Image (cartoon, rainbow, N blue to C red):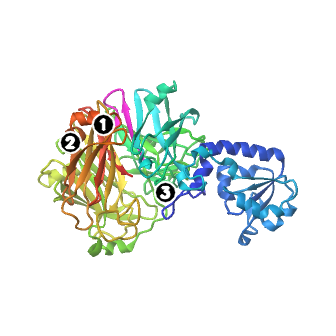
Amino acid sequence: MPLKIETFSNISGGNAFFKALTHPIAAEKAQELLSVLAAKGPVAIYDPLDAAEAVAQALPIALLPLAGYFVQDVESQGRTFAAHAAELAMALPGAKASSLLIIAFEATRLASQIEHLLPAGMEVHSLDALRLPDAMLSDPARYLSPLNFATNFAFFRDGGGHHTRLVTANYWGAYGGKAVRLWCRLYDGAGKRLAQWEEQAGPPNAAIVLDSGEIRARFDLPEFAGQLFVHVTGIAGHDVVKYALDTYGDGGDVLSCTHDANSWPADFYAGLPAPDEGEEVVLWLQNSQPFEIPAGEIEMNVMGRPEAVPLAGPLGPFATRRLSVSELLPEARWPRQVEIAAGKYVVRPRYEVFASNGRRRIAHVNVERTDLKPDPKLAELGAAMGKGHILPAPVLPLARFDTFILPTPMARGIERFPLKATIYDASGEPVAEHRFGNLRRDHASLLDVSALLAGNGGGLPCGHGHAELTYDFEAGCEADGWMHGLFRYRDRVSGHTAESSFGSHMFNSVLVYGNEPQSYSGRAPGLTTRLFLRIGQKPYGTLCHLIYPASTPWHAKSETALILTSNRGEEIARAHVAIPCGGSCHWRVSETFEAKALEAAGEGAYVIIRDTTCRLFGYHGLVCGEASFSLDHMFGF
């Protein structure tokens, strides 16, 4: 059965209780607590917050020698836990138990409320036995503050000539965080702890780089393909751990990039591509929990089809398994897609495509929403919100790259979704349009942008531009505002391929609908830009593709600053670009900043894309000469 633990709410955000319960350190302390309770004899459960069922999925408290289940809420009387009917707390004096376990953190007040009811000699325990050390708390006054659980996982591999590099910055220091540091634990494929250490984050805005090769050498480790758990402490202002993750090789033909794993495990993920002819698609399934995933709990199915194939065999705590889509779903072929019933056991997984030409690429799937239903009002917003929801993506230089677009359904409650794609040149002029029609969940409608432009009688004046997916309400009205797409790019020179996927937003409108145009800080609308662009180290160059989408007419041109920032967080140089409204800008770091400025910025330097006049959407990547390239969407903080 899927875990019945709330990990994330689109209304209230991440659930700190879940993270406090499943943190690796908490899991180790939980085993000590359970051993103590089991040794002392019968245990009574006091559940004032109605959390015992959820906790029991992470901690085997139902297997303790229980001698009663007690609740505080009168309306909870009579329900059961582990075959014990709930009794009100007033019945505690009759409990035949040696110990009482209070199912709550910060339980001192709760314990004092019932102290007079406890039989003589009864020991009182609570989930506070699982608390992290005070030195790891950013907000010591509130244990369940989200700031105390700024954690995330990363796919991490080093071996066979393949390496991974996590890059971010100490953005918490800019919000007022003091002595920010990263507590890191590396697990191998079996879930065994390989190494544990702390990294100082440096001054505000300093670069943070975790390289698998350096870490492997530092701790004298064997080859590994597992996951890295990161907990950032001393933070302020932002409880989300964002990062760019590059996979690179000893040879120039190995290169991909993706981003943070979204640290709240979800019920479903979608956007996993089925293999093309001659390809193998591997899902790297990584258990994000400190307990085993039972056999059959994870399932995969071809998108839109009910037949699901379960994962054979259990997956241990924090372990990694390589799953071949072709072995599980042999009938699935590109451009079909696969969805994953993950049961809240894993954070957003990565997948790796092994192409017929020997190349590899890594990307990620996305969270499939379970709370969304079609919104009929979206079709009525045209007069106020113009284009409404826009999903923008680059059209890379046509002389070298082919661009493919595959719409991906990303909500369980939608059966059809009407879409169209419009191709714009760099100045924002539309040059071609493709109507997908009213797509079904199980569609296989792939758009070849290069072929569309060729059939339309031309290309793009600057050789590059961008595509926008929007709802096509002439084809149908079943829209939910969670439009997604997978964008695949093929280099005709090297044969290398990269892909990225993301969802739509409303952009650059003073009006709001729901929480759109989305703002990452404060109330919508979000009308400014702060994007992070890590700079590749030799032999890798860095590319960036900025898009200025606008749901309604906005400022004629952007006022975009490209701020070269040193590895210590200091501004080294600044350049400016003016992107036409509805247009885009494709640029390289090496062509924008002088070599001496880049040298002064140092290894780990980055660029902040800042604009206070509009919200831009960006894609970034690395380029290894003529050998390979990578591409993914950017993040901000």
Name the element at disc 1: helix
Q: Left or right: 487 with respect to 282? A: left
Q: What stretch is highlighted in magenta?
A: 242-255
Near-viewer residue (633 or 148): 148
Which label belongs to residue 592?
A: 2
Q: Left or right: 43 with respect to 8? A: right
Q: Name the residue under label 1.
A: 601
Give the foreground label among 1 and 2: 1
Name the element at disc 2: helix
Tell me the residue at 20%/49% (across/down): 450
Is residue 525 located in the magenta-colored stretch of the structure?
no
How far apart in space, not on screen, are marks 3 and 1 (Cα)?
A: 53 Å
Give the foreground label among 2 and 3: 2
In the rendered image, residue 170, in percent from the top left (x then y), is placed at 42, 45
In the rendered image, residue 49, in percent from the top left (x then y), is placed at 67, 63
Q: Give neighbour class at mark 1: few <14, some 14-19, many 20+ (Cα, 10 Å).
A: many
In the rendered image, residue 194, in percent from the top left (x then y), is placed at 56, 31
In the rendered image, residue 290, in percent from the top left (x then y), is placed at 61, 44
